[in-house]
Image (tube, helix red, strand yellow):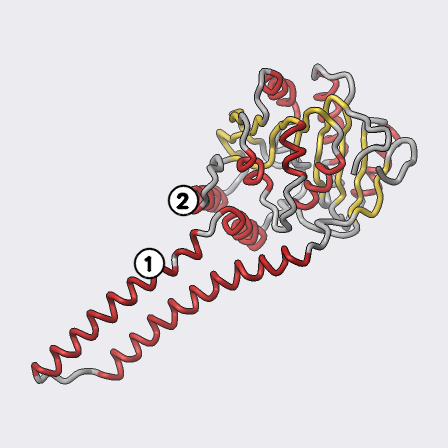
């Protein structure tokens, strides 16, 4: 979606929001201050309402009236963080695009130093967490396990301890928007694009207000999306499983033959049950992996729109671009 006047701004700040009425006022204050302190003449703050059930959209409308830099993108329903972020990025007009979450765990005040790096020729400056305050040992353990598993399975190098908090150039965003896949893992997609990318180390704060929007089940779904979007290695696991099965079957066959000629009683039912269970489990695992990728292919070929925007709210009262 492009402005009819083809307006290009210096900076776009894109923030997906889901039930963030408790933190939205403070978020706006800090982001606005960060933009004013940055060396930019024109900027916009794009707030994406991802089907919130609280008063988030009403607060966004009030902020639009209060501040002409604010743009509210209201989605038709809850699509999830990655698609809400995609909707905001599609609306962005800036030469540089600054992405952060609404919970203020990623400090907006880092905009200026990240912008300085970008202007020195870096296309993507991504925030890499040194510490993660206020998070449980279980979540930290799961995050570490996820990134290491993803690093092992993925053909694309995706940095560890990195979220969607980043500053990117316009050309990176243009390439990102040209990628049509439905199951989106945006930090991985940006890593796949390439160009010059650098880490910006920072300490992640505790959540300002509210509760996390990523409970365990959503985190698991997110991990599956990430791995299946950037690797076919899980499908290739069927090959070593098949080889293991052949070797085990050969050993059991040799044992059965030797037992027969040695006069030993062969415990048929136990061995048979073990063999059937083992190979059935391998077959089910391989079928599940194939089914996961087949299902994603089915979703992709339908070519439905990634999201539907109910309206875009601007100071001038316009309802879209």
Q: Quadrant of residue 120?
A: top right
Of callouts 2 and 1, the N-terminal one = 2
Q: Quadrant of the N terminus?
A: top right
Q: Please provide percent x and percent y for residue 79.
A: 70, 50
Q: Is residue 76 left or right of residue 257?
A: right
Residue at 63% of width from left, 48% of height from top?
A: 181
The residue sitting at the left extreme is 262
Residue under circle 1?
240
Say which quarter of the image contains residue 123: top right
Can you see residue 202?
A: no
Left or right: 35 as drawn, with respect to 106: right
Residue at the image point whose x is 58% and y is 52% from the top:
218
* Residue at 68 percent of width and 36 percent of height: 102
Q: Residue 134: where, in percent of width, then height?
A: 54, 37
Horizontal and vertical percent position of residue 63: 83, 32
Can residue 35 be seen here? The reply is: yes
Numbered label attached to residue 16: none
Against 162, residue 41 (above or below) is above
Q: Position of residue 42 (x, y in %)?
A: 78, 20
Q: SS at mark 1?
A: helix
Numbered disc 2: secondary structure: helix
Q: Residues within 10 Å of mark 2 (few under 14, many from 20)?
A: some
Q: Which residue is label 2 attached to?
A: 152
């Amino acid at each position: 979606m492009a402005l009819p006047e083809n307006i290009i701004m210096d900076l776009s700040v894109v923030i997906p929001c889901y039930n963030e009425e408790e933190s939205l006022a403070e978020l706006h204050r800090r982001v606005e201050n960060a933009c004013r302190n940055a060396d930019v003449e024109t900027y916009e703050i794009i707030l994406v309402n991802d089907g919130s059930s609280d008063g988030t959209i009403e607060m966004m409308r009030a902020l639009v009236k209060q501040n002409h830099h604010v743009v509210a993108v209201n989605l038709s329903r809850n699509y999830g963080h990655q698609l809400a972020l995609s909707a905001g990025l599609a609306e962005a007009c800036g030469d540089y695009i600054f992405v952060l979450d609404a919970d203020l765990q990623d400090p907006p005040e880092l905009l200026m130093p990240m912008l300085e790096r970008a202007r020195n020729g870096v296309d993507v400056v991504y925030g890499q967490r040194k510490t993660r305050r206020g998070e449980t040992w279980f979540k930290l353990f799961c995050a570490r396990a996820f990134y290491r598993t993803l690093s092992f399975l993925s053909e694309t190098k995706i940095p560890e301890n990195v979220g969607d908090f980043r500053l990117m150039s316009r050309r990176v965003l243009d390439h990102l928007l040209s990628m049509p896949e439905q199951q989106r893992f945006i930090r991985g997609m940006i890593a796949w694009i390439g160009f010059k990318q650098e880490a910006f180390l920072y300490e992640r704060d505790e959540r300002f207000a509210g509760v996390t929007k990523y409970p365990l089940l959503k985190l698991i779904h997110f991990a599956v999306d990430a791995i299946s979007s950037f690797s076919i290695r899980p499908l290739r696991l069927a090959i070593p499983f098949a080889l293991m099965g052949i070797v085990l079957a050969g050993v059991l066959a040799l044992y059965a033959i030797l037992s027969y000629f040695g006069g030993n009683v062969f415990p048929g039912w136990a061995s048979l049950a073990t063999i059937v269970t083992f190979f059935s489990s391998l077959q089910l695992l391989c079928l599940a992996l194939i089914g996961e990728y087949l299902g994603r292919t089915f979703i992709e070929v339908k070519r439905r729109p990634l999201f539907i925007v109910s309206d875009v709210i601007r100071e001038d009262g316009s309802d879209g671009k």
